[in-house]
Image (spheres, rainbow, N blue to C red):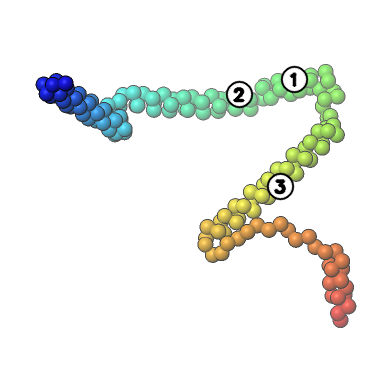
Amino acid sequence: MTWDSVHELGNEVAHVRDELDVLLGELDRRRHDALDVPLQLRRHATGVGLTVLAFTLVAAASVWLTMRRRQRRARLGARLGRLSQAITRMTDRPERVAAEPTIPAKIATAAANAAVAMLVKKLLEQGVARLANARGDHTVTVMPPVQPDIHQAGRGLQRFADTP
């Protein structure tokens, strides 16, 4: 390798570095522009305005349709029509009018109620412990309830009954 080829290669590396610096500078400027929300709102004011207007119109139309349906359902004719359909269904299948839930359904309902009650209790206990610990007064731990000793409770009641 000659000194001329080394200088030529060094010049080429310097030129590539300069181009890379220019490209990185432009990329950084574009990143700043893309993340500058006020600038983007100014550049795209028409699109943002039309989008907000469209969302507002859709929300207003949804509310209007809901109110209109509610008014229609409240009219006497609509209510009589629904009553007529209900009576027709009752006469077609009277066994479904006041059907008792089956035993498996009752068991499943009871199990679900117990599971939900336990979950709510645990969540409340943890929430109370977190609130108390967040205050910083002292550390609170959730303890399981104490099972009373029936024999001890009976003796205590007897002691109160014996006092004059």
82 left or right of 93 in image: left
Residue placed under numbered mark 1 in the picture = 85
* Residue at image mark 2: 72
Q: What residue type is labelled 3?
A: Met
Task: Return the residue nearer the eye: 5 or 51.
Answer: 5
Q: Distance between the residues labelled 3 and 1?
A: 42 Å
Q: What element carries label 1?
A: helix
Q: What element carries label 3?
A: helix
Query: SS class of the residue under badge 2?
Result: helix
Marker disc for residue 134: none
Residue 7 appears at what percent x and percent y? 12, 24
Identify the image quadrant of the N terminus. Answer: top left
Establish if 32 lies above or below 159: above
Q: Which of marks 3 and 1 is nearer the N terminus?
A: 1
Rendered view: 119 above or below 92 = below
Q: Nearer the viewer, residue 9 or 20?
A: 9
- Mark 2 surroundings within 10 Å by alpha-carbon count, few (fewer than 14), some (14 through 19), many (20 or more): few
Is residue 162 in view?
yes
Label 3 sits on residue: 118
Q: Position of residue 82 (x, y in %)?
A: 71, 22
Mark 1 or 2, closer to the camera: 1
Residue type indicated by callout 1: Gln
Viewer-side label of 3, 2: 3
Q: What residue type is labelled 2?
A: Arg
